[in-house]
Image (cartoon, rainbow, N blue to C red):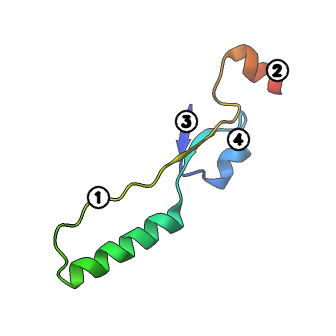
Amino acid sequence: MLGCDDVEACRYMEPALTTIKQDKQKIGRLAAIKLNDLINGVTGLRPSLVDPELVIRNSSGTVEEVTKKR
């Protein structure tokens, strides 16, 4: 089982939920820059990618691995 955005509650679930963490501040900064460029008529804008981070918790792995972590 896998969550998204590393919601704080995921850390306290049983089992703790593995999640994909995204740098929301970086995404916001890039969005603001793109919006500013669009407002100012900049052409040829390219997509920006932000690398996600996999945060592995107890919800992923074999049953034996998860059981041992408890």
Do tag 4 and tag 3 residues touch (Cβ < 8 Å)?
no
The span from disc 1 to disc 4 (Cα, nearest Å) is 35 Å
Mark 1 lies on residue: 47
Could you tell which of marks 4 and 3 lies nearer the N-terminus? Answer: 3
Looking at the picture, which amino acid does disc 3 mark?
A: Leu
Q: Is residue 42 above or below residue 54?
A: below
At horizontal 66% and vertical 17% (from top left) the residue drawn is: 62
Q: Which mark is residue 2?
A: 3
Q: Which mark is residue 68?
A: 2
Q: Along the horizontal axis of the image, is 27 left or right of 18?
A: left
At horizontal 53% and vertical 59% (from top left) the residue drawn is: 23
Q: Closer to the observer: label 4 or label 3?
A: 3
Looking at the picture, which amino acid does disc 4 mark?
A: Met
Residue situated in front as seen by the camera: 32 or 61: 32
Q: Along the horizontal axis of the image, is 68 left or right of 54?
A: right
Do tag 1 and tag 3 residues touch (Cβ < 8 Å)?
no
Q: Residue 5 location in percent, x, y?
A: 54, 52
The span from disc 4 to disc 2 (Cα, nearest Å) is 17 Å
Could you tell which of marks 1 and 3 lies nearer the N-terminus? Answer: 3
At horizontal 40% and vertical 69% (from top left) the residue drawn is: 30
Looking at the picture, which amino acid does disc 1 mark?
A: Pro
